[in-house]
Amino acid sequence: MKNDIIQLSHGAGGRQTQRLVSRIFAAAFENPCLDVLNDASVLPWEQDRLVMTTDTYVVTPLFFPGGDIGRLAVCGTVNDLAVMGAMPVYISTGFILEEGFAIADLEKIASSMRQAADEAGAVIVTGDTKVVPKHKGDGVFINTAGIGRLVSEQTISAEQIRPGDAVILTGSVGNHGLAVISARGEFGLKGPLRSDVAPLSGMVQDLLRAGIRIHAMRDATRGGVATVLNELAETAGVSITVNESAVPLSEAVHSACTILGFDPLYVANEGLLVIVLPAGETENALQILRGHKYGSEAVHAGEVHQEANHCVYLKTAIGSRRMLNMRSGEQLPRIC
Amino acid sequence: MKYVSEFQDRNAVQYLAASIRERVAGKDLTIMEVCGTHTMAIARSGLRELLPDQLTLISGPGCPVCVTDVSYIDRAIALSRMHGTVIATFGDLMRVPGSDSTLEKERANGADIRIVTSAMDALFMAGQKAGQRVIFLGIGFETTIPTVGVVIQSAKSRHIRNFYVLSSHKIMPPAMKALCEGDVRIDGFLCPGHVSTITGPAIYDDIVKQYGKGCVVTGFEPTDILSGILMLSKQILAKTPAVENQYKRAVLPDGNPRAKEVMDEVFESCDTPWRGLGTIPASGLKIRDAYASWDASVQIAVPVKESREPHGCRCGDVLTGRIQPEACPLFGNPCTPDYPAGACMVSSEGTCAAHYKYGFHRK
């Protein structure tokens, strides 16, 4: 089966489907809650409230430096729960596979999902597989949903943001977007570009367990840090100023962005949080974050303040100030 | 980043900005930065904030996407609809509105349109797509033209017959002269560094001789731009217009002779329409007859309806420095980078895009 490819019959619901599910998915996701024989899984729950999210993942190429679509599909959902102050517990997954897709690749993807879920302390408890004819898909699309348990009674939401708050970035910006672009090979980019895709629930849990008060928290995925900050500023009715010199940026991402004419603050990340918290909590928070492998580059990058315009500003490295607006459309490589 | 960060030094920037403030105190100066990359670099680095209010910077017609006539976009769209055709283009052109559509919309409707970062990528694509024709959308100034020339030469020597260029290349000096003859006050030009690496600074001699306007060839990092402005301010205030080269680390006195040779070999001068400036004699470059087999406008006949500019759009006035983007009735509503009405809002080098992105209108 390992040298085999996906055929339409793998999605027909018969013996072939069963075989695929048991050989690939059940083997990779194996855990006491996973019930491949029934239509749904029955799960224990102890709290009054749960946190739930879902997201669908499409990425070209499916495998890129630092990760693959499987890791992305689990981490994205885990992080969406984490930023609400919840620990992921259960994950569901749906696959849309294209006819002809290599089963060996599917196995790698499933194994990445298991690894990421293990790291986040979650289990994959139910799933679904469909197969579409050749050229009707892009190899594999994955949907995941996640259920999380709240680890803190704090309300973490943009409305909590107050003038005087500090803004923390937990890592260097732009790594995921540039790694994917370079893996596509379209622009002849080479170099140490590596996606930051990572499950951040452990890091968030460390912060919350230490009693750090957090006003708002977002993972800066599509649209990058600048887009998240604009959304926060608008919702909270405040202005935010980011200090350009403080923003962590790798040499490789900086160079690639300069060549392509991209602004790294608008490039996607998959393992970076924007955290807004009372200024007095900053030092403790940074200490905890920096002790974590996904937060070693964490910095205090900006401040919240009250201005008539609810804008995001960038204090540039050369000592001027400019607007960091919401991004429009996709960033396109420029002509010269 | 080496050889870049040195030119972003905070102390040097502050020193240069203070020197400019001191020098122009109490005097009104209007400087045009011709090149779109300058416009973006100025906005992105927030330099305006460091400059005195009496120093007005106006953006010129040096964004190749912005000055591309609507009729060219319409032709590109018509070609993209032809069976067996792949359009290869720089990313900036994707969202430029034609009369009724954009390349981006055509791609969504099934046209095969690929973004490339060089004409060579398009030629490789043609090599891999026997049976289909690949048309490269050749726009740009002296910076880009030699690379397109080399690719056309390469197509000829390698007998690649399914590759074409739809050329709307333009050269800078005739547009600058047209501006000098217009009604907009310009005291001097920050001249495009990239164009000048190919041509050398001598192409601006006539601007100084005929129109008495100072010309300083300028690089793109903050200290480059401020040095260029300082050099130009000195010239203007002392009334000693001259061609000076601030960007010596890239621009040699003769430019790039090999690149100029290629340009001459493959292209010849023609009249061409500029958005905002109309048709300017001898301001364009078309593909010479010897290379006509690779010229899409010669080889591929396609009906194109009469083109029309978007109603109310004042890109033309923005490109010639007559108005700042905020004075256009469409700016910000409905024209935004998401739903651009005019090209100046699309390109990463467009003046309206720079003003919108960096929020000049919200201050």
Image (spheres, coloured by chain):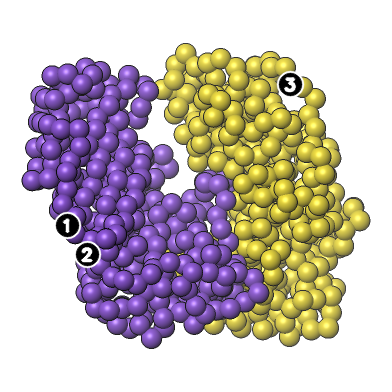
Q: Is residue B29 visible?
A: yes
Tell me the kind of residue under disc 2.
Gly
Q: Which mark is residue B199?
A: none
Q: Which mark is residue A121?
A: 1
**Residue at (45, 27) in percent of width and height:** B125
For label 3, the residue is B304
Q: Position of residue B254 (x, y in %)?
A: 63, 53
Distance from Cα at disc 1 to Cα at disc 3:
61 Å
Same chain under badges 2 and 3? The reply is no
Q: Secondary structure at mark 1?
A: loop
Q: Position of residue A13 (x, y in %)?
A: 20, 21
Tell me whether circle 1 and circle 2 mark residues in contact (CB < 8 Å): yes
Q: Secondary structure at mark 2?
A: helix
Image quadrant where residue A184 sits? top left
Image quadrant where residue B54 sits? bottom right
Distance from Cα at disc 2 to Cα at disc 3:
60 Å
Which chain is painted in yellow?
B
Tell me the kind of residue under disc 3.
Val
Which chain is painted in purple?
A
Residue B191 lies, with reference to residue A103, above or below; the image says below
Q: Secondary structure at mark 3?
A: loop
For label 2, the residue is A202
Pointer 2 indicates a residue of which chain? A
Tell me the kind of residue under disc 1.
Gly
- Image-based side of A286 in relation to B116, left or right: left
Residue A283 lies, with reference to residue A5, above or below; the image says below
Image quadrant where residue B248 sits? bottom right
